[in-house]
Amino acid sequence: VSELRRDPITGRSVIIAPERPFPRTTPVTAGGRDACPFCEGRESIAGRELLAWRPSGSAANGPDWQVRVVPNRVPVLRVESDFAETSDVLLQSLGGLGANEVVIESPRHDASFASMKADDIARVLWVWRERMRDLHRDIRLKSFLVVKSVGRTAGAMLDHPHSQLIALPLVPQHLEDELFGAAAYYRTGRRCAFCDLIAEEKEARLRIVGGDGHTLAVMPFAARVPFETWVLPQAHGAMFEDASDATLAAVAERVRDVVMRLDRVLVSPPYNLLLHTAPRGEMARTCYHWHFEIIPRLESVPGLAWDGGIYINPVAPEEAARAMRAVDSLRA
Ligand SMILES: [Zn+2]
Ligand SMILES: [Zn+2]
């Protein structure tokens, strides 16, 4: 039986049309090691570092590091660009202003969030946060995106674990939609929609993947694709830049646990991990709640079915969450 659902925050429409068995995909395997610019020892090829985690105190731009940030060699946007706002109200262009950095998440070519220790993932989150705090000093930059891509189907050009940090002089549409929905909800009851969602999901227990006192991993009611999972800090916070080290550590462990379960259930699927965090502005602080969205990219899944913006998802999130929770019994 299929079911039409709407996302409570964005209003996005999804048709849940269950199919059996679960869609599968070609597992991600790490190849292309020989020419990899991100491997340890090839620092000069990857580029001059903007920030690195070097616990041994090793020299910048040489080997012996845990996480390294370099400018994207082919940036989509640049901080040095002119902020050439056009006067045309209908056809707006903001020039090429922005920033595009690459975070090399491990010196190890075959590392993954499933095999890395939670501490190592926390270090990656720390780097994202520190770079955002630095870029925030440029008041022209309004919002940030972090996109981690694993596997070709998810858009990764290289197999070495990495993510892109993008700073924009505008608020992208997906964030605008979430902010709009969250603000509308806030106006009705002076409450954060995400905080209320956390409470409701904990009560219902149907879509929970995992959690602890600080975090919750849950599949959204109107999941766009099979096994879409959100990881939220339970304490209210609009901006990732403001998260404490303790919060980052707890979220890192939750993300690790979700990716490990996905790897077990779907056999190392390609996926994207996206950070959603509030742009500059006071309104966003009260009504928005930062979180990660993990989107597996499975083959033979229609995803966006029609250009009208309706998704068709062949796996109900309740079913997917049950499979993810069952990983514990598989291990025992
Ligand atoms: Zn590599
Ligand atoms: Zn909240």
Image (cartoon, rainbow, N blue to C red):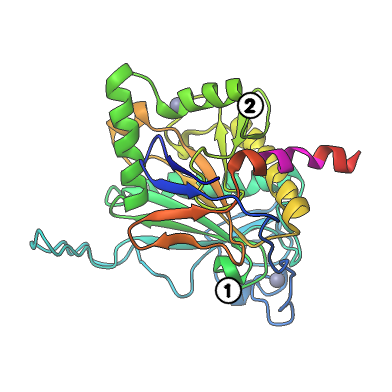
User: SS at mark 1?
Assistant: loop
Q: Is residue 299 above or below residue 331?
A: below
Q: Residue at x 62, y 73 (%)?
A: 158
Residue 148 figure quarter: bottom right
User: SS at mark 2?
Assistant: loop
Q: Earlier in the sequence, mark 1 or mark 2?
A: 1
Q: In the rendered structure, are the residues bearing label 1 and label 2 in contact, judged by CB atoms less than 8 Å apart?
A: no
Q: Specify the amino acid type for callout 2.
A: Arg
The chief SS type of the magenta part is helix
Q: Is mark 2 within 8 Å of ligand 2?
A: no
Q: Specify the amino acid type for callout 1.
A: Met
Q: Residue at x 52, y 33 (%)?
A: 243
Q: Give the percent coordinates (x, y) of residue 261.
A: 74, 46
The residue most toward the front is 1
Does 324 appear in magenta?
yes
Q: Is residue 18 above or below residue 92?
A: above
Say few, some or many: other residues with alpha carbon within 10 Å of mark 1 (under 14 / 14 to 19 / 20 or more).
few
Q: Give the percent coordinates (x, y) of residue 152.
A: 60, 71
Mark nearest the camera among 1 and 2 is 2
Which numbered dot is residue 157? 1
In the rendered view, does 36 fall on the left or right side of 225? Answer: right
Q: Is residue 216 above or below residue 222?
A: above
Q: Nearer the viewer, residue 130 or 121?
A: 121
Question: What residue is disc 2 on?
Answer: 205
Q: Quadrant of ligand 1?
A: bottom right
Regarding residue 178, the answer to whether it shows in the image is yes
Does 294 appear in magenta?
no
Range drawn in magenta: 321-327
User: How many numbered dots are placed on residues in this image?
Assistant: 2
